Image: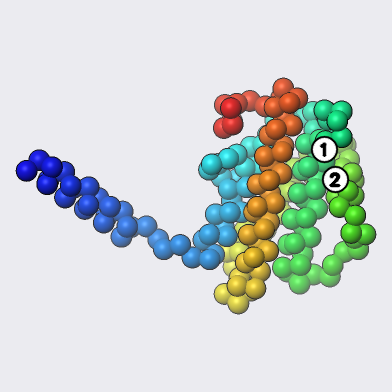
Amino acid sequence: MKSVVTALIVLLSFSAFAQNSKPVTLRSSLLEQLHTTHDQKDWFVPIDVAVDGLTAEQATWTDGKGNHSVGQLTYHLLFWNQRELEKFKGEPEKKFSGNNDETFNDFDTKKWNDTVKQLNQVMSELEKFVESADEQKLQKWAPEIARIGTHNAYHVGQIVFVRKEQGSWNPEKGVK
C-alpha cells in the first residue's frame, strides 16, 4: 500500500510540474543559448563570469606557445557578435578582409574594460533582438543565432582555460 501511495504522489508531482512548465519554443531555446553564454550560469560559466575581475594586464597574458590571450578571445567574440547583430538589424556590412586573425589581433590592452562593456552590450542587444523578432525573422536567423551560442560557448571555455593556466581563475566561480 505504501508503494502505491508513493508512486501516486510521484506521478502527481510530475503531472503538476508538466502543467506549470512552459512549452519550449524556438524563441525560448535561442534565448536560453544566448543567455547561458552571456549572463546565466548553467552547465558552464558565461562570459560575464569568465572575464569578471580580470585586469588589462592579466587579459594580455599568453602561455608563450602561440595561443590567444583572454583579451584577444574577448575581442574576437565582440567582433563576431557585433557583426552578426548588425546583419540581423539590416545594417550595412562593415568592411572586413576575411582574415580571421585580425579578429583576435586587433585587441588593444588600453581598451580592455571598454571591450568587456561593449561585448556585454552587444550580447544584451542580441537577446533583445531574439525577444522582439517576428516569427519570420526568427525562423530565418535561427541557425545563425544557434551558431553564435555555440561559438560563444567554445571561446568562453578557452577563456576559462587560459585563466586556469595563468593562475587567475577562481574555481569558486563554477569550474574547478
- Toward which corner of the image does residue 131 lie, by quadrant? bottom right
Q: Residue 167: horizontal and vertical position, in percent?
A: 72, 22
Mark 2 → mark 1, Cα distance in angstroms: 8 Å
Q: Residues within 10 Å of mark 2 (few under 14, many from 20)?
A: many
Tag 1: Cα neighbours inside 10 Å, few (<14), some, or many (≥20)? many
Residue drawn where x is 87% and y is 35% of the image: 66
Tell me the amino acid under the disc marked 2. Phe
**Quadrant where the C terminus lies?**
top right
Q: Residue at x 6, y 43 (%)?
A: 1
**Considering the numbered disc 1 on the image, is that residue within a helix, a strand or a loop?**
loop
> Are circles 2 and 1 on residues that touch, CB within 8 Å?
yes
Where is residue 165 drawn, in percent x and y? 73, 26
Of labels 2 and 1, earlier in sequence is: 1
Position of 19 with respect to 4 (left or right) is: right
Q: Is residue 100 above or below residue 65?
A: below
Query: Who is closer to the viewer here, 22 or 115?
Result: 22
Q: Residue at x 68, y 49 (%)?
A: 152
In the drawing, does residue 150 fall left or right of residue 21?
Answer: right
Given residues 117 and 46, the one toward you in this image is 46
Most extreme residue toward the top, as rendered? Answer: 167
Residue at point 56%, 45% (across, down): 40
The residue labelled by disc 2 is: 104
- Residue, disc 1: 68
The reply to whether residue 56 is visible in this rendering is no
Q: Indicate the quadrant where residue 133 lies.
A: bottom right
